[in-house]
Image (cartoon, helix red, strand yellow):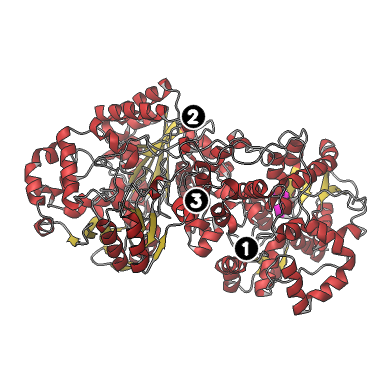
Amino acid sequence: MDRETDLDPDAQPTALQNDGPAGRATDPATDPKAWPGADAAVRELEQQLRGEVHTSALRRALYSSDASNYRIAPRVVACPLDEADVVTAVRIAARHGLPVTVRGGGTSIAGNAVGPGLVLDVGKHLHRIVGIEAEARSAVVQPGVVLTDLQAAAAPHGLRFGPDPSSASRCTIGGMIGNNACGPHGLAYGRTADNVRRLRWLLPNGRILDVAPGRDALDQVPGLESFIQQHLEVLRTELGRFNRQISGYSLEHLLPENGRNLAAALVGTEGTCGVLLEAEVELVPRAPAPALAVIGYPDMPAAADDVPSLLSHRPLALEGLSGEMVEVVRRSPGGDDVPELPAGGGWLMVEVGGADTAEAVAAAEAMVRAAHGLEAVVLPSGPEAARLWQIRADGSGLAVRTATGAHAWPGWEDAAVPPEHLGSYLRDLKELMDDRGLSGLAYGHFGDGCIHMRIDFPFASGSSEFREFMESAAKLVARYGGSLAGEHGDGRARSELLPAMYSPQALEAFARFKALFDPAGLMNPGVMVDPDPIDAALRRPASSEQRAADGFAFADDDGSVADAVHRCVGIGKCRADLREQGTFMCPSYLATGDDKDSTRGRARVLQEMLNGGVVTLGWESPEVHEALDLCLSCKACASDCPTGVDMTTYKSETLHRTYRGKVRPLAHYTLGRLPFWLRLAAPMAPLVNAAGRVPVLRRTMMTLMGADARRSLPRLPRAPFRWSDAGRAPSGSGRRQVVLWVDSFSDALSPEIPADALTVLDAAGCGVEVIGQSTGEQACCGLTLISTGQLTAAKEKLRRTVEILLPHVRAGRAVVGLEPSCTATLRSDLVELLPGHPGAREVASAVRTVAELLTELDWTPPQVSDADRRMLVQPHCHHHAVMGYSADEEILDAMGCDVETSNGCCGLAGNFGMEQGHYEVSETIARQGILAKAEASPDRALLADGFSCRTQVKDLAGLDGRHLVQVIAAALRAGE
């Protein structure tokens, strides 16, 4: 069997510099000295739980981090099947002295959901909405219910759950109760604690409490009433001072004047006092017709100064947005569509309710008249207001980078002060950050005095700056009577700093309260009471440094592979089904529901590889390859992930470093070198096609290729495009000179597409030259080599392609691509693989899709016939991620098409769906997406530019698809 023998003269060693970071040779979580009863506990869990119990390095790596800066590998992970499983697991852990940490969606930003003992994942199975009582305005839910699922269930009743954090599409109600989450509408509807009616609560000893307001609930906890009486002064003077005082325990709810509400007091205890089994939560009426006011100010502090004057107008939400964040949103993919804002350098976005649109707009206008801004706009509810709100939504995800592009980290991301002090606090905070050379993008819930900001702590070089800043910031916020946490909880990030905010008496009260519920201290240790140091177990400082070598350049991360992999901070957007909102990420997770198949899960395993304590064999670690196996290399995360994680690149780099100079999997030699085999097979097309029609021969051929035998063998055309007359001569002169780059797939498998492309480009007035297929020039992007990690050979292909295309580009010609994945490769991977090549960036910047070129021309496309008007469009994943699909939508709209778009991957994704072991997942993805759409709209013709997309629907549903140029060419011919 051949090896990849093309050697790069600039090649550098590709192995890890160390087997793991210094001091990480052992795994503390499996050290028998840590918990002598751990092994016995694991055995009992495996024997008695009906849900999953995991001790593998892969699973422990997946659960080693949440959305915070922290990394703690658990001893064991359990995914309980039901409430009985949870009770059994907690009892076993308590009996053997094994700590317990409960996890929902894993979106905790303060390090609330990582722990060294047993991690209980209640999000996987305990996600049932038990019931909704519309008249009582309440819902009963299990802890793993995702917020958007609850909102969707409540919406038909005209109701919603009030608090709405930005992570609503993946955070769980249990997590919100654990952290006392709020969100933008916390201003109108309160915190989670204000919206909980009853809790079913499990203590470590196995007792289950039914907790509601009133004396009866207090009586279930021996000593609790006495505790309240002994700490009345602390509870009345230090707690509950303003709405966003989330830090510490919210024990003010226990006071007689507050209804002796133990349920509310347990909200925000961050898993340190027991386990939530079920919750009854309050629902509120949906605002019938909110209006949006956007008010501009000179800067953020000036906007904050004006907040108190607006609160009397009782807004539903009052959010702040900085000029720097708006600029970052404008520079992001799709940022060209960001609408203009009123004049200013900082803005307040204020939502005001009303019985109808007119009343809401009038209320918003009255509020604007009371404001002291530079300029304002008021909009009724609708698309324009939604586009403005989207700036705020996009900004919260993009804040993981500073205005200069540096990686920004949580830690001080949600501190809050009383709103009347917000402007002064912001000025002092900026001065503190400037003094330390730190920066971040500020935004937040200004109406509540809560500021969100991730900061560019230099974690790659250590953590001392982090501690120094955090200690100073804690003193600053305490000086203003504020809270270290305004909605995310204290976790590992801020618990150690609570003495800056609370008296020794208050801290002693917290410890005594926890002891009433968890006397052995087994529930989420290191958080809130007896906290771990804030700079212990930080993930990024513990990572080994890996530099780009002879594969990808990782230019956006200054050549640091470690920085690239640590782009993932656990936000978890990849775990949400957002296809109806136009996203494509993450198809394999949506198919399997397994966190190892999410972008976040894969990033966590790669991070653990660099940390070395759990995943110990570097790039060749089986855990790494198992996590990456179901990655489709769709590249959707590169555009859809707010942090810019590009798992396609990481997978390719991993395969390159693992197999370089070694024998590769069979599919790498067949599917990974498909253009070579297609050229070789072209003269034998009739024979190959005949063999493909014989089932036993087809199955044998597919098996020998390393492909799934259930797949069809692509039918070869009578002749490839390069043999046709059209492929031998340019189509003449025109006002725009272009080069038609015919990729290997279009040439060898769909020659009718480049033929129609010539028709379209000629009709648009272009002078077209076809890249010299007839002269033997092979302008190949190396896509299949890249996807299988054969990067040395791919770079040689790309160098040759740049040599072929560069003279045309320098002559002023655009390079027009047809196959989206190949076009995207020249637009993105080319400069990453050949960063030092003088012509690579020139070529990449000249590459266009057909639609992009046509929208640049002064040309009106033809109208489609009535028979072709209704279309179901499947954008290719790489098209979506790299080029965007807006130009195609513009062309289709101009042609009079009625378009329905299927967002998400088709499931084939090049070689992925063809390879053995991937068929079921590939089919599931298709049936969840494009095939479901096709079945629901059988009268729509399928438009799919990607060869993989057309192959998938043909294979699984017998449906034919067309390329955009075929649709345009058909309309041209019909109009002749």
**Residue 970 position within the rendered picture, expressed as x and y whole percent measured from the top left:** 78, 64
* Circle 3 residues within 10 Å: few <14, some 14–19, many ≥20: many
**Residue 12 position within the rendered picture, expressed as x and y whole percent measured from the top left:** 69, 36
Badge 3 marks a residue whose secondary structure is helix
Kindly give the residue lying farthest to the top in the view shown. Answer: 435
**Residue 952 position within the rendered picture, expressed as x and y whole percent measured from the top left:** 67, 67
Occupied quadrant, residue 861: bottom right
Query: Which residue is identified by label 2?
Result: 461
Instruction: Determine whether 860 is above or below 962 in the image.
Output: above
For this rendering, which residue is in front, 284 or 796? Answer: 796
Q: Is residue 439 left or right of residue 288?
A: right
Q: Amino acid at mark 2?
A: Ser
Query: Which residue is identified by label 3?
Result: 600
Q: Main secondary structure of the magenta part?
A: helix
804 inside magenta stretch: no
Q: Which residue shows up at 74% across the image and 35% down it?
A: 10
Residue segment shown in magenta? 820-824
Q: Is residue 106 left or right of residue 269?
A: right
Callout in the foreground (2, 1): 2
Q: Count the marks: how many?
A: 3
Instruction: Confirm whether residue 756 shows in the render.
Output: no
Q: Quadrant of the N terminus?
A: bottom right
Badge 1 marks a residue whose secondary structure is loop
For this rendering, which residue is in front, 765 or 263? Answer: 263
* Circle 1 residues within 10 Å: few <14, some 14–19, many ≥20: many
Instruction: Determine whether 976 is above or below 335 in the image.
Output: below
Q: Amino acid at mark 3?
A: Arg
Query: Which residue is identified by label 1?
Result: 906
Q: Is residue 447 left or right of residue 294?
A: left
